[in-house]
Amino acid sequence: MTEYVPPPVDRRLPTEEARDLMALVRELAEREIRPPAAEEEEAGRFPRALFTLLSESGLLSLPYASEFGGGDQPYEVYLQVLEELAAARLTVGLGVSVHTLACHALAGYGTKEQRAEHLPAMLGGGLLGAYCLSEPAAGSDAASLTTRATRSGDVWTIEGTKAWTTHGGIADFYTVLARTGGSGPHGITAFLVPGDAEGLTAARPERKMGMKGSPTAQLHFDGVRVSDARRIGEEGQGFSIALSALDSGRLGIAACAIGVAQAALDEALAYTAGRRQFGRPIADFQGLRFMLAELATQVEAGRALYLSAARLRDAGLPFAKEAAMAKLFCTDTAMRVTTDAVQLLGGYGYTADFPVERYMREAKVLQIVEGTNQIQRMVIARHLAGPESH
């Protein structure tokens, strides 16, 4: 019996260049990313050499301007690239999303001189970035962060601890949000901190239920000194810069979630087509066919939602509400699809011999990062009904 292989996603891409780009991504995914994924995740190995290859291939710079080494691709295309990468291995797809997030502040708010000095290496020079907003006591309430930057002449000294930093300890640069003024969101400023800055150390990576190949760690800033030339935007502008980055970052998480969901669906389709019980493939049984139809519908709905938000962004229209909706729906979809994929594979789904148990463990974190799904509901409600009364 010929093994059933689900067809690739039929993507509506806007240009021939985008179609060629997607073909390159699929080739890299099948040749370099997917084959070692299970083994490397189990061993907790981060594919640093692969990220260098992605940088050389232009895949770490897609949504940024070519003037500074970017790919000039709309978010509609960039997010579909993320989806393909995440379907092959979430550590890679999410890593590209985090790197893109780490470049956002400088690309959007840096001076022309800052961008010319730093962006080419950040976008295509083999560097890897990370984003430092959350702290041990400031997660969902990011405006209460306490890491402080104090100025003396043209030098800032940063003291404090950041938490839940993807690529913590291995990144070449960090976009860091630190308090430079009073309490609340208006006292926060953004800085670009080199990964090898004196006084910057990483704790042991967190022990996670999934994404073991992607290091997540606390970062300790013990008198880290950075010049004022590495301050991004105006003093006190950091929180609005962070929120702007998170709107786009949530779309990245949504795309990654649909990638994981699609991978789980494909595995379930292949398994149910090949597994025979009572003399026929189990995919012939109506109960399982209906499950597969439901999962496929959820995946397509999530893809349509994140692409709709991306097209708003590309058109220069407000998209914060739609980004929150996409992050909420797509990550909940990934959790549901991966859970049902485990069920469809029965006992085999619960073993590490098949990837769906890993997809299920990985899907959970997507409901938490870049703002928990409870926070997304708050964001959406504020857009619909206005801020809460106190």
Image: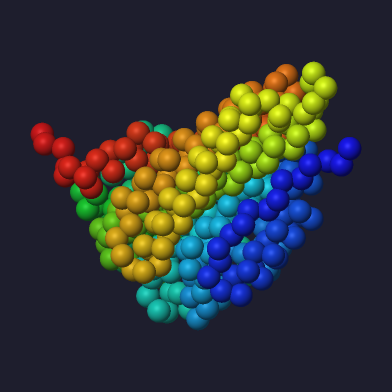
Q: Is residue 318 above or below residue 118?
A: above
The residue lying at 35 percent from left, 51 percent from top is 322
**Along the viewing direction, whichever of 264 and 110 lies nearer the viewer:** 264
Q: Position of residue 63 (x, y in %)?
A: 50, 67
**Can you see residue 209?**
no
Q: Residue at x 76, y 53 (%)?
A: 30
Q: Is residue 107 left or right of residue 198?
A: left
Residue closer to the observer: 189 or 388: 388
Instruction: Name the quadrant containing residue 210.
Output: top right
Q: Residue at x 29, y 60 (%)?
A: 318
Check the picture and name the quadrant holding the N terminus. top right
Q: Is 324 left, or right, of 253 in this rendering?
A: left
Seen in the image, is 48 located left or right of residue 207?
Answer: right
Q: Is residue 61 left or right of residue 134?
A: right
Residue 342 position, x and y percent, is: 65, 26
- The front one of 137 and 360 is 360
Q: Is residue 120 above or below residue 38?
A: below
Q: Quadrant of the C terminus?
A: top left
Q: Residue furthest left?
A: 390
Determine the image quadrant of residue 91. top right
